[in-house]
Image (cartoon, rainbow, N blue to C red):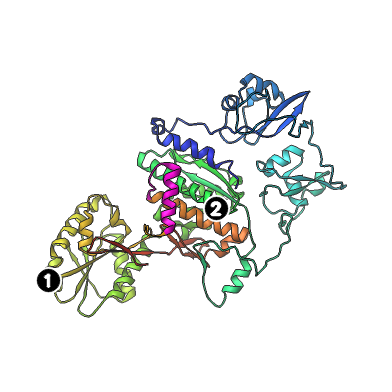
Amino acid sequence: MNMKHIFPLAVAFMLAAFSPSWISAQEYVAPKVTISKEKVRSGGKVFYSHVVQERQTIYSISKAYGVTMEEIYEANPALKLETEGLKKDQILLIPYKGDIQENVEPEVKTEPVTTVQETPQEPAQEANEEYFIHRVKWYEDLDAIAKKYKVSKESIKNINRMTSDKVKRRQELKIPRDPAVWEGRTVTEEPNNNEPEVINPEVDTDTTGVTGKEGKDSILDDLFVREGHHDVNITMLLPFSATKSGDRTSFMDFYCGALMASRVLGSDGVNLDIHTFDVGGGNMPVTQQRLASSDFAIGPVSKSDIMRAAGINDGATWIVSPLDMQVETLTDSLDRIIQAPTPTRIQVKDMVDWIKSDMRHGDRVIVVTPASPESDYLNMVQDEMAEAGLPHITTTLGSMRSQMVSGGVNRIVLACEYTERSTVFLIEALRNLYMLSGKNSEVVLYSTSKIRTYDQIEVEQLHKVNLHTSVTYSVDYDSKEVKDFLLQYRALYNAEPSRSAYSGYDLMKYFVTLAHKYGKRWPRALDRVDYKGLQSDFKLVKTASGSYVNNAVRRVVYNPDYSVSLVR
């Protein structure tokens, strides 16, 4: 598992989250500088070979290695560090003094020491008139390799029959001796990275929670997408420096949950490369090239930020909307958008289907609205009831009691927008239902997930009215998987996981599992492979524009004995 972007960022953000500096979006905790294990010899002196990581500074590097900034400047005159500064993936020579306390023990005598060349030395084992071989290091991308050998990216891609800029650790690339010969050619297929490109129906890499849909085409579909094990490259775009402190905490929790999933996947042999960007405060510091090199991007969060990211992306990769249900509207017009949270309309449809399946002779469905009933939520409820052929009465709170029946079950829907302005209506409606329930009137309240977000609502009332809610998220704390997650999360972060933490875990686990199992063809498995997570499920349905919307819904019942049951 490639950790070069995961834990430096995790440490920085965790420290920030528990200190006053997190309040200011301008303050920054520098990522940890890990001392390199590689050494080289130049001019009779021994140096560490340090690869510059994102947001590292000369100061932080010098402190980690126990040298001065001037010594680093003097060791790297060709880089013009004093005037041009550091660049990501630059290789710095750091003077080795032999007395640095570090996690690895630097022993020049027992480690191979190479000589720094003015130009890269070609591997001796490969003798070919057209090219020589370069083995990709974990910190290199195609830009760095092309710059290293002073050839164009186009020539490297063409001689290796590559259709994208993605390279993998330890991949052997042909480097053309005469790059001009390989420029301007047309590439028709992508390399297999030194492995035979065979789709083997006997190979399966099943991961707990992921199941293929059954059907007459399931075998052919599985053969079509299966490719074995693959490294996964991810870009995360999260607003860590959001204006509201509550939002910052939520996004930090989401990130921590995603890191937990990465840790689990890494222990299972999945190699991940995660690049994380702070897109808070209107920033969008990501390039199309970065997105194109990713299997998918998680985030941004808000609808407006996803539109901006989609403009930069221009179809280069898939963008996963992690938390905002309103992004669903973009999936009708933009391609390569995946709406991960189940939209409200899908929850409403499930709620109506649930009411219909529960209906018995003598029951009545009552839709209760505020005094000003016009709302998108009410329209969704009425449209779905008409589609399902479900008879119902629409009334206001003042007339609700007169519409209730005594010989059957009153199945109630509170049709409001579930915004801050709805608080008074919801509190008053629940108080009335609480008082009426059991007095010659049996009441069952049906709702979507938003009703559970109001702190002002007393949970006792939800149990009294036997709340049946169709939700996009719900945690079964009795399951072994959840118990294991809780123990690990508490041990790592010394905190309780929030809903956002569970969301980050489930989302990262699902999409990485697909990309790891199916490789570059993983999007073709999106509507064929479902996933049951710790808190959320994924059942993706393709839209007309080629994007995907999650249609998975969990059903939760608040029982009169104050227990909560996950019934689906």
Q: In the image, what residue occupies the spot 42% across and 58% down?
A: 480
| Mark 1: secondary structure | loop
Quadrant occupied by the C terminus: bottom left
Over which residues does the magenta segment extend?
480-498
Q: Residue 496 magenta-drawn? A: yes
Which residue matches tag 1? 440
Question: Which of the pair 142/393 is nearer the observer?
Answer: 142
Q: Earlier in the sequence, mark 2 or mark 1?
A: 2
Q: Main secondary structure of the magenta part?
A: helix
Q: Position of residue 13 (x, y in %)?
A: 46, 37
Residue found at the very far bottom of the displayed protein: 361
Q: Is residue 285 above or below residue 71?
A: below
Indicate left or right for 361 with 528 as reference: left
Residue 259: mark in rendering = none
Q: In the image, what residue occupies the spot 46% across and 65% down?
A: 539
Indicate left or right for 289 with 18 as reference: right
Q: Position of residue 19 (x, y in %)?
A: 40, 32
| Front: mark 2 or 1 | 2
Whole-angstrom CA distance, mark 2 to mark 1, is 55 Å
Question: Which of the pair 87/15 is nearer the observer?
Answer: 15
| Mark 2: secondary structure | helix
Residue 265: mark in rendering = 2
